[in-house]
Amino acid sequence: MSCYEIEALRLGLMTVLGVGDDSARDHAEKELEGHLEGPIQGLAEADSLAEIERHLDAALVDLEEEVASMDSDDPEYDYTRGRLLAVRDAERAVQRLSAQGESIVDGLGDAHDTLHETFPVEE
């Protein structure tokens, strides 16, 4: 059993954040062999946080549907519910990352404005 959503998310975030950990990338790619389709593929190949958020939301919908269709006596039921919780937690982490990134951009804009207010440039 594997958590394809998390491995695909790791690949997407490595790309978006410029993380060059080849061994982690190789491991994730091996875990995903034969499972790169739909939101999993979208996550693995994402080039932006916005893409990651979109594909992660779609992966969550698929996973929620999978859990809802399972019999609670199924031996994989608890694991699949655990995957759902882990992916929901990952979604919140990605949302925090996006909010922090936006805050940094806003802060740089404020710093730029403050610099020009402190040292006006006459044209």
Image (cartoon, rainbow, N blue to C red):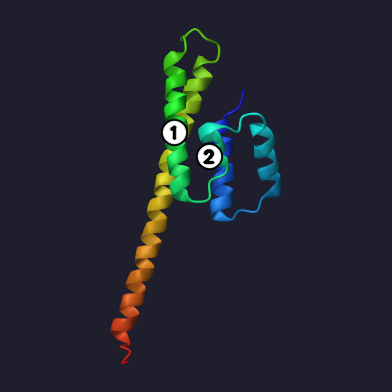
- Compared with 106, 70 (above or below) is above
Q: Nearer the viewer, residue 47 or 85?
A: 47
Query: Residue at position x 57%, y 42% from top?
Result: 10
Residue 76 pos. (x, y %): 55, 15
Say which residue label 1 marks: 58
Query: Residue at position x 54%, y 34% from top?
Result: 40
Give the number of marks: 2
Would residue 4 appear left or right of 97 to someone viewing this image? right
Q: Quadrant of residue 110?
A: bottom left
Q: Earlier in the sequence, mark 2 or mark 1?
A: 2
Q: What amino acid type should be assigned to the residue bearing mark 2?
A: Gly
Crowding at mark 1 (Cα within 10 Å: few <14, some 14-19, many 20+):
some
In the picture, which quadrant includes the N terminus?
top right
Cα separation, mark 2 vs mark 1, equals 9 Å
- Judging from the image, what secondary structure is the residue with disc 2 in? helix
Q: Which mark is residue 42?
A: 2
Q: What amino acid type should be assigned to the residue bearing mark 1?
A: Ala
Check the image and name the residue furthest to the left.
Answer: 117
Residue 74 pos. (x, y %): 52, 9
In the picture, which quadrant includes the C terminus?
bottom left
Query: Residue at position x 47%, y 19% from top?
Result: 66
